[in-house]
Image (cartoon, coloured by chain):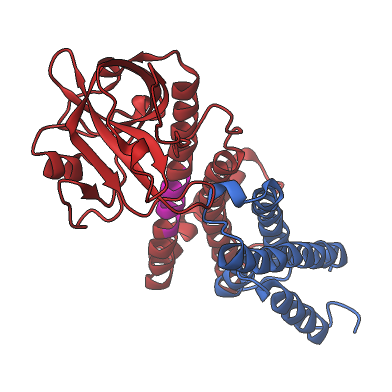
Chain colours: A blue, B red
């Protein structure tokens, strides 16, 4: 299928980048609010807020490449929604990427 | 689809009909209902972030504006403090009423335990304005003494504290500063909100340590996070609409291919 390799690579990169940033922020959030008094705005570092902002935009890119891939490989509506939502749940995008990879190899769309 | 415009027009009409038929099937109506719910939620969440952005900017504008007499910044005394007055620098002239002072228990300043002193300032028109004079150590009774004689005060207007609304109130001690608790303590009407004292003249003898206002001050950075989140929610909403139409088109096309063999 034309362009599929590129589409999957783009999705793969975004799943990992978004996933790593979200996982790091999740750990940071728990430590920050649990032990470093982030509920008090004064003690919340600028980098922390900046990274959440970055994650917001990364997720927008994740949506675009995710939908592009889903349309190319003709995923069902529910499956597509599951892939898109995976970008907002900590660690879920890693699993989503692995499942998509496995599925595409099984369908012979990607070299195994 | 390289035929004449008329044929192309017919094909488009047929496709639109097929999409509409598919959209009205139970499965697609359910999907539509779910999507509409999500899109409405995304629009409202974006709206909320937008309002947050605007209120932070309004507070910043209030903080950098020139000080006004406190009566001008207080709105209707029965309602809440007007949004544009939150964090506004104000001045007031009057006399502290020695019978209108309460302590606010359990307040620390830079980690030191202690309490806050709130004293009613009697203005020339007879109205009573609560002034948070500052923080003292719990055993520092000298600083609590109510200054006598006319004073000029300058500070920042802060809205009522909204927590512990049902905490018990005595005439000498409250738990959170609010119109409700001050009126209960003093048995007299006060406006909503209070002045966080920054400067007082004359300042004689020991006095409470002024505390920093907890409202936004002039040096807050632009609320970029709220601002971006607002747009991101709206992008998600638009994305939902795009996805629905695209899916409908694909599925309708697939169904048409399966049911007819005319094209080809």
- Please tell me in which quadrant of the rendered image residue A28 appears: bottom right
Closer-to-camera residue (B156/B6): B156
User: Residue B7, how many percent across, how many down?
Assistant: 60, 46
In percent of the image, x 23 and y 23: which residue is there?
B75
Residue A87 at least partly seen = no
In this rendering, position of residue B178 left or right of residue A60 = left
Residue B34 at least partly seen = yes
In percent of the image, x 48 and y 43: which residue is there?
B49
Considering only vertical position in the picture, is A66 above or below B2? below
Closer-to-camera residue (A52/B199): B199
In percent of the image, x 22 and y 37: which residue is there?
B101
Closer-to-camera residue (B165/B121): B121
In percent of the image, x 50 and y 49: which residue is there?
B13
User: Residue B243, how many percent across, how many down?
Assistant: 57, 57
Task: Give the residue furthest to the left.
Answer: B187
- Please tell me in which quadrant of the rendered image residue B177 appears: top left
What is the magenta range?
B38-46
User: Residue A85, how many percent across, how many down?
Assistant: 59, 67
**What's the magenta bit mostly, secondary-structure-wise?**
helix
Closer-to-camera residue (A10/B118): B118
In this rendering, position of residue B116 left or right of residue A8 = left
Residue B43 on the magenta span: yes
- Please tell me in which quadrant of the rendered image residue B128 appears: top left
Considering only vertical position in the picture, is B158 above or below B257? above
Q: Quadrant of the C terminus of chain B?
A: bottom right
């Amino acid at each position: 299928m034309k362009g599929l390799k590129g589409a999957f690579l783009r999705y793969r990169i975004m799943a990992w980048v978004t996933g790593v940033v979200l996982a790091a922020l999740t750990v940071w959030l728990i430590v920050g609010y649990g032990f470093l008094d982030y509920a008090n705005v004064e003690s919340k570092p600028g980098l922390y807020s900046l990274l959440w902002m970055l994650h917001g935009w990364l997720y927008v890119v994740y949506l675009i490449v995710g939908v592009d891939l889903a349309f190319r490989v003709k995923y069902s509506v529910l499956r597509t929604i599951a892939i898109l939502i995976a970008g907002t749940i900590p660690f879920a995008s890693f699993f989503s990427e692995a499942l998509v990879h496995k599925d595409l190899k099984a369908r012979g769309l990607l070299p195994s | 689809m390289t035929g004449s415009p008329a044929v192309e027009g017919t094909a488009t009409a047929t496709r639109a009909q097929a999409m509409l038929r598919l959209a009205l099937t139970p499965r697609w109506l359910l999907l539509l209902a779910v999507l509409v719910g999500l899109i409405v939620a995304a629009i409202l969440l974006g709206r909320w972030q937008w309002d947050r952005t605007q209120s932070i900017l309004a507070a910043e504008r209030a903080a950098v504006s020139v000080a006004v007499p406190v009566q001008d910044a207080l709105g209707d005394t029965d309602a809440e403090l007007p949004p544009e007055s939150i964090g506004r620098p104000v001045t007031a002239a009057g006399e502290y009423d020695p019978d209108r002072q309460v302590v606010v228990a359990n307040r620390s300043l830079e980690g030191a335990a202690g309490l806050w002193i709130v004293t009613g300032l009697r203005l020339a028109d007879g109205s009573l304005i609560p002034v948070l004079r500052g923080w003292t150590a719990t055993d520092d009774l000298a600083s609590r003494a109510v200054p006598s004689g006319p004073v000029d005060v300058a500070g920042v207007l802060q809205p009522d504290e909204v927590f512990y609304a049902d905490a018990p109130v005595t005439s000498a001690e409250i738990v959170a500063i609010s119109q409700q608790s001050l009126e209960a303590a003093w048995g007299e009407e006060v406006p909503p909100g209070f002045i966080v004292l920054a400067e007082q003249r004359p300042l004689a003898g020991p006095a409470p340590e002024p505390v920093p206002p907890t409202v936004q001050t002039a040096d807050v950075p632009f609320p970029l996070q709220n601002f971006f989140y607002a747009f991101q929610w709206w992008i998600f909403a638009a994305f939902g609409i795009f996805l629905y139409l695209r899916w409908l088109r694909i599925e309708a096309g697939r169904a048409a291919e399966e049911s007819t063999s005319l094209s080809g």
